[in-house]
Image (cartoon, grey):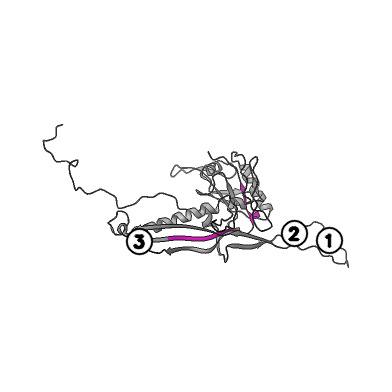
Amino acid sequence: MAIVSNTFQTYQAIGDREDLSDIIYNISPTDTPFMSSIGKEKASGVLHEWQTDALAAAASNNHHIEGDEISFGSVSPTARINNHTQISRKAVVVSGTQDAVNKAGRNNELAYQISKSSKELKRDMETTLCLNQTGTAGATGTARKISGLASWIQANTSVGSGGANGQVGGADVPGTARTDGTQRAFTEAQLKNVVKQCWDEGGDPSMIMLGSFNKQKLSGFTGGSTKMTSAEDKRLVNAVDIYESDFGALTVVPNRFSRSRDCFVLQPDMWCVAFLRDFQLMDLAKTGDAEKKAMLAEYTLVSKNEKASGAVFDLTTS
């Protein structure tokens, strides 16, 4: 097919308007399942402290003769536990010109960048809270760090060969992150064993938190899965969102920001985030033709009693 001579086409045209959608598409995940499932409290110092206690073991020989002199056993003191606070922040700077020009997808550049940074900050905090790291007190030129979830879990665990639990908690407990062991396939026997350990210690776990690969593995467990066909919409349901254990039902929650090699068995009311400074937006000094803002939080993770929870560590991830 021939083109008529001297036809003016878009290839030669100058001044055609851009076809740029007025919507910005962003599918980056913003869910924070661990932080959203646990409590919140106020911290009043950079070293946040609390106490834990435990009952004496149940005795089967608590019987005495009439008129016997009463003897007194030793009293165990409470355990004083702590965690350092950590400062996490995001900062934005937008020139006056960029805020003034006509933009696609947003009216106010500064407001858009602040909104984006607040979501990024929460993702950073979720990642930090789940880390395998022990707290550090910090110093001039050295930032404080919190002890993360993976290093808190000590009592109820299943670990790979060479793996060892961390030690965190207080002045009398040396702070060490857990030692990762040889990775192995996730099995239902490992999960059932950890749930049992939690229950034996007095816990009442209600949540299983793990990465996407091992979430799919768990959906294949025969003891907790429900596979059925719906005659109405012809769907095959082959997933587990509630795992029915011998000690109660646990909600299965995938987490994009926890370590994919860890599967946590949690009692959420035994964990909380303590804020020394809750989320805040700070106006920074104007030193040029630009607006500066910072989003900041200062916080720590509180393990009210880690024996209520557990973890299957050192799992394969692919």
- Magenta part of the protein: which range? 294-318
Q: CA distance from mark 3 to mark 2?
A: 65 Å
- The nearer-to-camera label among 3 and 1 is 3
Q: Secondary structure at mark 3?
A: loop
Please tell me whether residue 223 is drawn above or below residue 110 in the rendered image: above
Where does the image place residue 302, in percent across and percent down from the top left?
59, 59
Which quadrant holds the N terminus?
top left
Mark 2 closeness class: few <14, some 14–19, many ≥20 residues within 10 Å:
few
On whether residue 301 falls in the magenta region, the answer is: yes
Q: Which residue is mark 1?
A: 63
Q: Residue furthest top?
A: 1
Is there CB contact under 8 Å for labels 1 and 2?
A: no
Pointer 2 residue: 56
Question: What is the C-alpha distance between the residues marked 3 and 1?
Answer: 81 Å
* Residue 50, image quadrant: bottom right
Q: Which label belongs to residue 288?
A: 3
Q: Is residue 186 left or right of residue 59?
A: left
Residue 35 in the image, given as x and y percentages of width and height: 52, 56
Q: Earlier in the sequence, mark 3 or mark 2?
A: 2
User: Label 1: how many residues lie within 10 Å, few (<14), some (14-19) or many (20+)?
Assistant: few
Q: Quadrant of residue 294?
A: bottom left
Q: Amino acid at mark 2?
A: Ala
Q: Residue furthest left?
A: 5
Q: Is residue 197 visible to the viewer in this orientation of the structure?
A: yes
Which is in the foreground here, disc 1 or disc 2? 2
